[in-house]
Amino acid sequence: MKQLFAIIAYYMFGYLIFWTILHETNLFPTIWVEQNFSIAIYIWIFFFIIPLILITLGTEYIKNSISDFKSLNTETKWPLYILLFGVWDLMIGFAFLLFLYFEISHVTMIIANALFISGAYLTFLSFKVAKKLQLSRKN
């Protein structure tokens, strides 16, 4: 778990430096982002969210959570899917409202990243919880 928090902390710190340099030096094309918002979101996901997901998938916490998910019975997985749909619907909805009603700034991007990181953490935590519930039902 400490490894996961360290990865997230390094990622957020590096991202904040990157965003600050681009924003404060006027290198960041804010007019282009406003005109091509959907493309900018895809670029953000490709260069920041996907690498973070790939890095965190290598941690022991995530590997253990995935093995917990693989060992679940099929009747235990359906409630988990409904829960995960609700979690990600909430996270994506919050991110959509954030981008829709606030300008793109440091705070907006940090909150958006925190939402997606929280969603990923809750996803893998729910795997462990579902596995513990399944084991407690057997006993």
Image: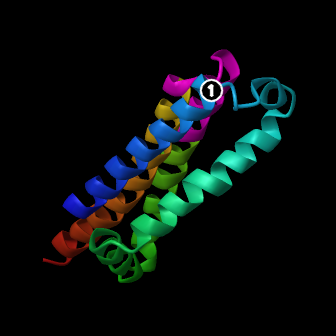
Q: Position of residue 5 (x, y in %)?
A: 27, 53
Q: Residues within 10 Å of mark 1 (few under 14, many from 20)?
A: few
* Residue 73 falls within the magenta-colored stretch: no
Q: Amino acid at mark 1?
A: Thr
Q: Position of residue 26 (x, y in %)?
A: 68, 25
Quadrant where the C terminus is found in the figure: bottom left
Q: Residue at x 37, y 62 (%)?
A: 124
Residue 115 visible somewhere in the drawing: no
Residue 120 falls in image quadrant: bottom left
- In this figure, which residue is indicated by the disc labeled 1? 25
Q: Residue at x 35, y 65 (%)?
A: 127
* Residue 104 falls within the magenta-colored stretch: yes
**Image: 116 above or below 100:** below
Viewer-side residue, 117 vs 55: 55
Magenta segment boundaries in residue numbering: 90-107
Going by the image, does 95 lie left or right of 27? left
Residue 137 falls in image quadrant: bottom left
